[in-house]
Image (spheres, rainbow, N blue to C red):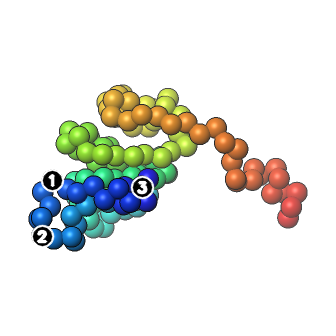
Amino acid sequence: MRNLISRLQIRRPTADPGSSYGACYGLTIVDALQIAQLCKTNHTKYLELVQDDMLAIDDLGTEPVEVMDYGNIITPIIDLLTKRYEAQLFTIVTTNLDPKDIRKRYGDRIADRLNEMMAKIVYRNPTYRMDEIQTDGMS
């Protein structure tokens, strides 16, 4: 997707006609765990991701749902997805979670918003990871 978006060279409507830097959309790809960490360690960068025109979140479900920051409980992914939903920003999510697991982990509100704002593409390809039974025999 990143290569496709880059190749299409879609100009931002707010881009300066005389400038080429940042004039076209790009896709930022970030791991869900990294988003949770950024929310606590680099809040400015986290807020940039929240407002990024096009964002892909890889491995949703590998991050902690809640993060403690100076005694405050924050929910980085839930907050990010809520704000992106409200702003109607382009968002791609990859996950190994089933829809019922997403609902259980993030709640009905986020699950409903994800269903509304995204189209599901299910890959049924075999995994490239070896299960524990196979690796035990190879040791």
Q: Of marks 2 and 3, which one's residue comes earlier in the chain?
A: 3
Q: Which amino acid does label 2 sit on?
A: Gly
Q: Mark 1 points at which residue?
A: 13
| Residue 82 position within the rendered picture, expressed as x and y whole percent measured from the top left | 26, 41
Q: Residues within 10 Å of mark 2 (few under 14, many from 20)?
A: few
Q: Name the residue under label 3.
A: 4
| Residue 68 position within the rendered picture, expressed as x and y whole percent measured from the top left | 32, 55
Residue depicted at x 12% and y 64%? 17
Q: In this view, does 13 lie above or below 20?
A: above
Q: In this view, does 25 lie above or below 123?
A: below
Q: Is residue 16 left or right of residue 137?
A: left
Residue depicted at x 50% and y 45%? 95
Residue depicted at x 36% and y 60%? 6
Mark 1 or 2: the one toward you: 2
Q: Which amino acid does label 1 sit on?
A: Pro
Q: Is residue 137 above or below residue 113?
A: below
Q: Is residue 116 left or right of residue 126?
A: left
Asked if one can make out residue 36 in the rendered structure from this viewpoint, the answer is: no
